Amino acid sequence: MTKSEIESKKRKKKSRNHGVQKNNNKPINNHYENEKHQIPLSSPSSSSKLGKLKTKPSSTFLDKMRARLSGGHFRMINEKLYTCTGKEALDYFQEDPSLFDMYHAGYKTQMSTWPEKPVNVIIKWLKKQSPSMVVADFGCGDALIAKSVTNKVFSLDLVSNDPKVIACDMSNAPIVSSSVDVAVFCLSLMGTNYQSYIEEANRVLKPGGWLLIAEVKSRFDPTNGGADPEKFSRAISDLGFNSVKQDFSNKMFILFYFTKKDNKRKSKGKETEWPMLKPCLYKRR
């Protein structure tokens, strides 16, 4: 083979190698062209950002989960209070006072949907009465009545988170007999022995004193398993009260007004027949 032929062969080989390299580079260059307009997944900072986007729940989701858990706890405690005695409820909260706060947080959430709150109706009524009248608020919650009127108020509930609130079983209030002008039960006849709370109110009330009871309307709907409001009123009258008024005007609650006649039962020798009050239980949504 001549020298010129050898040189020609080398040039052809070199040309073939160059062509292969060119073909291999082409897809690489095309891949780069496509990728340079995207987030490089190998970048530490971008990888971290994507990780956060994938693993961190939204604040809305967390809020919904907290609300659901809180609502579940409220329903559980609410059912407990409606299906046990006042003494059992007192022991329950004394074991874990934080449950009381949990319950009232849920209670406030429920009340926020009511167009009118019964406690505000009662406060409005009290402000029209003499400021010298002594009030006993059975099941006071956050003691809103005491904070809203100038009257002396005994604020009673199962737990005291306020120096003004007296923690007690409402069937055994630390109040002197015949020393109170107004006894209030605002959505607080929750125990299975609710009649003993009313009997305790009767004990502490002066003759001529007022008994105000606000309750969820459905608890007094006989067509839906509720108590007959007339039977309820008769039972209280048997303790020695006059039924002054039953206010059904509100969509959510009924308000009873009674005055105490004297310290004796109306029907001597006859046992008072107390109707069973339907528990106000909330369904899971």
Image (cartoon, rainbow, N blue to C red):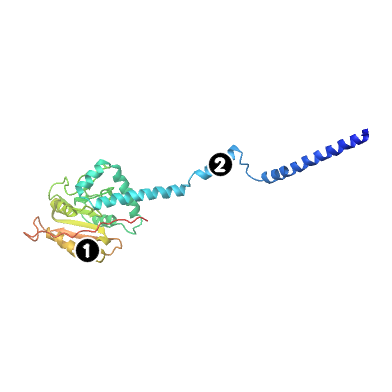
Q: Quick check: marks 2 and 1 in contact, CB under 8 Å?
A: no
Q: Amino acid at mark 2?
A: Lys
The residue type indicated by label 1 comes to Gln
Q: Position of residue 31 (x, y in %)?
A: 69, 44
Q: Is residue 239 left or right of residue 148?
A: left
Name the residue at the bottom extreme: 223
**How many numbered marks, from 0 up?**
2
Residue designated by label 2: 49
Q: Callout 1: helix, strand or loop?
A: strand
User: Where does residue 181 sit, x and y in percent of width and height?
Assistant: 17, 53
Q: CA distance from mark 2 to mark 1?
A: 63 Å
Q: Residue 23's x, y, as percent?
A: 76, 43
Q: In the picture, which quadrant includes the C terminus? A: bottom left
Can the viewer see residue 34? yes
The one of 121 and 199 positioned closer to us in this rendering: 199
Seen in the picture, residue 161 relative to 123 is either above or below; the reply is above
Could you tell me which secondary element the residue under label 2 belongs to? helix
Residue 1 horizontal side relative to residue 132, left or right:
right
